[in-house]
Amino acid sequence: MSATSAIRTRRTIWRKMKSDLMMGVTVLATVITLLPLFIILAYLFAKGASSLNLAFFTHMPAPVGEKGGGMANAIVGTLELIGLASLIGVPTGIGAGLYLAAHRGGRLAAAARFGADVMMGVPSIVVGIFAYAVLVRPMNGFSTLAGAVALAVIMIPLVTRTTEEMLLLVPHELREAALALGVPAWRTTLWVVARTAASGIATGAILAIARIAGETAPLLFTAFGNRFWSTSLTEPISSLTVQVYTYAISPFPDWQRQAWAGALVLTTIVLALELGVRWVTRGDTRVAR
Amino acid sequence: MAEILEATHDNVGVAARPARVGSFRVHLFGDRFFNLVTLLLTLVGLSILVGLAIALVVDSSPSIRAFGWSFVVSTDWDPVNEKFGALPFIYGTLVSSTIALAIAVPLSLGVGLCLSEMAPAWLGRRLGFMVELLAAIPSVVYGLWAIFVLGPWLRDHIEPVLGKALGFTPLFQGPRVSVSMLCAGVLLAIMVVPYIAAVCTDVFRAVPQSQREAALALGATRWEMVRIAVLPYGLSGVIGAIMLGLGRALGETIAVAMVIGNSPQISASLFAPSATLASVIANEFTEATSTLYLSSLVELGLVLLVVGLVLNVVARALVLGATQRRFEEDN
């Protein structure tokens, strides 16, 4: 009797130890997963901050072999590309999201929802090829417009699906109440339902902007790059991401130093958008992936 | 009842009726206009996908006609002699993604279980947020960091150990350089973990509490509960999460292009440079001078698109099934 209970106790102790061990392993996995985040941020600050100076923001890139210079045109170029892409992508995405939320059971809505989900899985370099085929070649040259369209194509499905999700969170009673008061359906959708979901929709749009701000691949052969100011939509334009890429793989130490500075600026922009929006909404919204 | 209805009907003045009808029409017009606008925007979104597929097929047709199916099995990539085969890139893509998943999947399962079963709610939220930040870092920044930090570190500290312990297999032989298949694989692992881990966390959180309670009531320890209740229940969702991660790894371009070395050859050693479908497009697209060269690169993109689409569709169906079942059982 006592022998069996001793065995039982030993077995129980073993099972508990095994359980603690495995749960400890999951904690370890989490630590290992998050480690690169801190290592990368530490390197960015260590290497980037020391290379960052006023000239970086105000000067143009120096000619090959010369020291100094900055990324003024790339910073402005990135802002231009993001602005233009948002101008195309955000209204289209929100409009499509409104349609999807209004026609839940419709066949076209189902097709569009499926299409948006599929688009989210398309590698961004493929989107670049698409923009090249429909804009760069017909227009005979790399252009700001082609770059912005490529980024907008990446944005649209993200904004569409987030908008739809956010609209569906609005209680149906709210909609019914407005309709019962005789408010036309379209005004109900815009002024009652969409307004209630506005902060969620805005969050989705800003997170989509943060996502495209860090894109390099679709810009390589659409916006291309430019050592000077770009003054027209049909000219190639410089961007932070492409500039960091070019400088990072260059053999010149001074360029590599500037790549770290550019990466720090880029990461700051992207993380500021992410953190800012989440701090404002307190993590209420989840964006489509 | 009928009397009342009649009375109200009579109360509506003859003059008032057309006005009402008129304003009703205005409402209808507004609705129709609004519907039309949103419909058009939806069609724009949908037509992008269709247009994308058409553009890729049309642009790759010269190469499809010239090489046919031999394109995907040929190992020649010789722009000078206009001979193009995709096998080295397909191989590079598969191997680098396999390394990435081999590292990322166990880590993601650990993170998912830690966040759903171990961490208290306040800590789980913060950790989950940090995992999402990891996904937000631009890939060019990952690439920059890998060129100057991860690659040299792997070369100096990890590859010698691997070479010593497993050097008898062809996988871990040969000269050590900082740009290699191994470096690309490890970097991809770091980049896809946040995606797989986030979906795994959702999937595990969607396991009904009753399943856990049943296991605990039978005397299971916490780990046994995970093994008999949480993992089997979330299995299809986990598979979907892995496929989503695989889709990301296959399509990741710039970070891989920066560290893989871009050499179109099939080498058994993981220490050797290689190239992937996405990285070769990024590297050579602007240099492609002839039509055939360009269309071969577009066909690589087409391969990437088709594989990505299939993975994504199946994965989403699996994840959706795993996370929505909860609502049916709880309600």
Image (cartoon, helix red, strand yellow):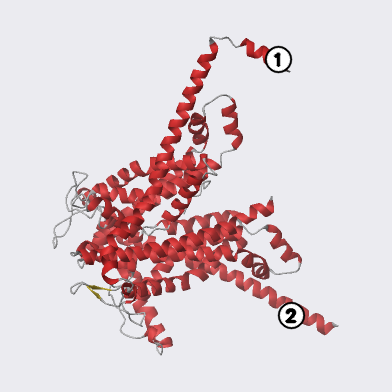
Please determine whether, in this image, residue B186 is positioned above or below residue B115: below
Kindly give the residue lying farthest to the bottom in the view shown.
B168
In the image: residue B122, left or right of residue B82: right
Q: Residues within 10 Å of mark 2 (few under 14, many from 20)?
A: few
- Secondary structure, mark 1, is helix
The chain holding disc 1 is B
Q: Quadrant of residue B156?
A: bottom left
Does the CB distance between marks 2 and 1 fall below 8 Å?
Answer: no
How far apart marks 2 and 1 lie (CA) works out to: 84 Å
Q: Nearer the viewer, residue B307 or B55?
A: B55
Residue type at tag 2: Arg
Kindly give the residue lying farthest to the front in the view shown.
B65
Please determine whether, in this image, residue A144 is positioned above or below residue A98: below
Kindly give the residue lying farthest to the right in the view shown.
A1
In the image: residue A278, left or right of residue B261: right
The residue at the point 14 percent across, 61 percent down is A64
From the top left corner, tell me how far across and down residue B63 is, in percent: 27, 67
Please determine whether, in this image, residue B90 is positioned above or below residue B191: below
- Secondary structure, mark 2, is helix
Residue located beneath label 2 in the image: A10
The residue at the point 54 percent across, 66 percent down is B239
Residue located beneath label 1 in the image: B4
